[in-house]
């Protein structure tokens, strides 16, 4: 349970938890995207047999947790804590899933940064010796998010080219004190950053400075160079936010052009699937990590990655009240094997 | 940083953090209540110089954090993490406060259970050796909550007698690896409990079973008897929920009639102040703990208390969709001195 505090925002886990399994459930559109083969379940219909999109999202969460448990051959009663959240008001998806799962529950809200917020706290709880098995989960749902944050789908509003497409999906990861990796080895916790962007249809631009701040702090705290990573991947900056992040990093003296990718760009074929700047939502980095990236780490195609889920902490009310968009990004280092 | 896991939901902190200071800011109505003398700042106007109630609530959070820091003679840069949340969609109060405070931030949502959720995670982060100084904070605001969850104030809706009055206020506590107490010694994390209550104007009834479940688990896990505590105090069950909790506990074989109180009953003079079943909201247990209870622990009038903030995890959408009200309660033991 020893740890070493490296800097103001980063800790190194000396008893790093192992991610022993993951589960993913995604919607039909995600199932037509380039990462389809890495998802456990692809829905035919985004209502998932429920009578509302919000209830469907909650079912996504339950089923992705159950899928991860099943692969780890564990039961719900083996889980000591669940960390999770979603984009719906009052965490409707995760709160109602936690009711059925009956795992002691810490609800989190970090907008689309919630997957790494969840992995950060879950990994500290394991490393600190407070639990042996913990689940970290997040979800989002395109149709539920559109009507809560933007417009009813029925009104057929035109989407600006800067807009992103909320991923319908849930990803869950089971962290354990025992296991053979991949391991979470470093945790960098973000500050809220706000560069004054007020356009709620351009969240990539709002979130890019937060991602850059967290990456910069992580590199400064750990002494790592960008090339020490096989991949540095943000949650959902999309094409526009990704370009801004690269430029801001260059101004700070970091060239990440070879190593920086974005889950929101990877999850859809943006040209063919008409998703404009790319995917977004709590579920975006959750399903890309729990599906594709976890597979690549297990098969050692990737050995060391930095995952930085990025969240825009605006609310429809804050936008109406003329506020700009505060953003946050949390980073975790995930390594396929431990190097002493 | 050693800890001992006692049972399925409770941990004992062997390096318990000290709560070195607290800060409170409350609205005018709370300042007319029986606990007025324990609050740092009482507002004349619940807009607090801002142009919206939501912005005023965010200022409450900022000012209660600053008040706690000032009393501890610490700066914002001394804080390694901030744990906090509120009732507003997307945590508008805490997210925007975190933007100005620039402390690495974990956003939490547990409805009115957020104060003890925050204290739970903050105390594990200190006990585990991940940080030396952490702030835990929550807020709520009557006028902002009414228009988000219920009706515009302007419509003058009649309030049922079972309804509660959301506390306008924020409480912040600074937890430190060093200090002379009071100490957080045990953490019991709740599961989501739902007895099928659907009346969103009777949240005390919905939350009582969650409080009872967490109290029951805490006593079973630790082996404590109710009388080992000077006070067992729930967050905001109100008069109706308090009575239900006592009856449910009695059915489980526990007589808590002498020791169980409720922050929602204590914070207002319910008869004179027309608050029906009592106070509620994230800010309720926050200001009662950070104001009154902290004072009583410091002066050794109370030596061992169990604080159980209680949250109703409903959303206006879940209510419209016919769902019942899932609830959760998290408990922390706070002791004025350490007994080995």
Image (cartoon, coloured by chain):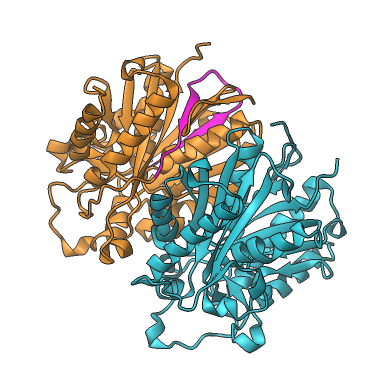
Chain colours: A cyan, B orange
* Residue B262 in the image, given as x and y percentages of width and height: 27, 32
Asked whether, in this view, residue A121 is left or right of residue A49, the answer is right
Quadrant occupied by the C terminus of chain A: top right
B81, A129: nearer the viewer:
A129
- Residue name at image x 63 percent, y 75 percent: A36
Q: How many labels sit on residues?
A: 0
Image height of A259 relative to B24, above or below:
below
In this picture, is B55 found above or below A29? above
Residue A192 appears in view: no
Give yes or no for residue B189 being in the magenta stretch. Answer: yes
The residue drawn where x is 32% and y is 20% is B226
- Lateral position of residue A300 relative to residue B309, left or right: right
Q: Nearer the viewer, residue A32 or B1?
A: A32
Which region shows up in magenta? Answer: B168-191
Image position, residue A19 (x, y; %): 67, 50
Is residue B238 a member of the stretch shown in magenta? no
* Rendering coords of residue A278 (x, y %): 62, 77
In which quadrant of the rendered image does the N terminus of chain A lie?
A: top right
A123 or B307, which is in the foreground?
A123
Q: Is residue A36 something that shows in the picture?
A: yes
Q: Position of residue A125 (x, y in %)?
A: 60, 39
Q: Quadrant of residue A67?
A: bottom right
């Amino acid at each position: 349970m020893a740890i070493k505090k490296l800097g103001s925002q980063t800790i190194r886990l000396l008893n790093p938890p192992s991610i022993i399994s993951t589960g993913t459930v995604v919607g039909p559109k995600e199932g037509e995207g380039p990462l389809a083969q890495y998802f456990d379940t692809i829905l035919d219909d985004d209502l998932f047999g429920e009578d509302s999109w919000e209830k469907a999202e909650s079912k996504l969460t339950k089923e992705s947790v159950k899928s991860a448990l099943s692969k780890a051959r564990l039961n719900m009663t083996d889980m000591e804590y669940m960390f999770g959240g979603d984009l719906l008001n009052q965490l409707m998806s995760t709160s109602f899933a936690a009711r059925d799962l009956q795992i002691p529950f810490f609800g989190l809200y970090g907008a689309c940064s919630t997957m790494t917020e969840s992995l950060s706290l879950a990994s500290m709880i394991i490393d600190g010796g407070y639990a042996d098995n913990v689940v970290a989960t997040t979800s989002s749902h395109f149709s539920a998010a559109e009507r809560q944050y933007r417009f009813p789908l029925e009104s057929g509003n035109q989407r600006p080219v800067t807009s992103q497409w909320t991923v319908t999906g849930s990803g869950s990861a089971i962290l354990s004190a025992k296991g053979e990796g991949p391991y979470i080895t470093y945790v960098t916790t973000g500050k809220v950053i706000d560069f004054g962007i007020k356009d709620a249809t351009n969240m990539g631009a709002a979130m890019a400075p937060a991602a850059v701040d967290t990456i910069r702090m992580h590199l400064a705290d750990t002494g790592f160079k960008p090339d020490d990573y096989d991949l540095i991947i943000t949650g959902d900056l999309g094409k526009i936010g990704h370009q801004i992040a690269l430029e801001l990093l260059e101004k700070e003296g970091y060239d990440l052009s070879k190593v920086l990718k974005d889950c929101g760009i990877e999850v859809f074929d943006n040209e063919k699937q008409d998703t404009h700047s790319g995917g977004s939502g709590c579920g975006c980095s959750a399903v890309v990590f729990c599906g594709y990236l976890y597979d690549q780490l297990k098969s050692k195609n990737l050995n060391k990655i930095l995952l930085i889920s990025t969240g825009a902490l605006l609310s429809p009310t804050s936008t109406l009240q003329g506020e700009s968009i505060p953003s946050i990004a949390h980073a975790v280092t995930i390594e396929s094997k431990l190097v002493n």
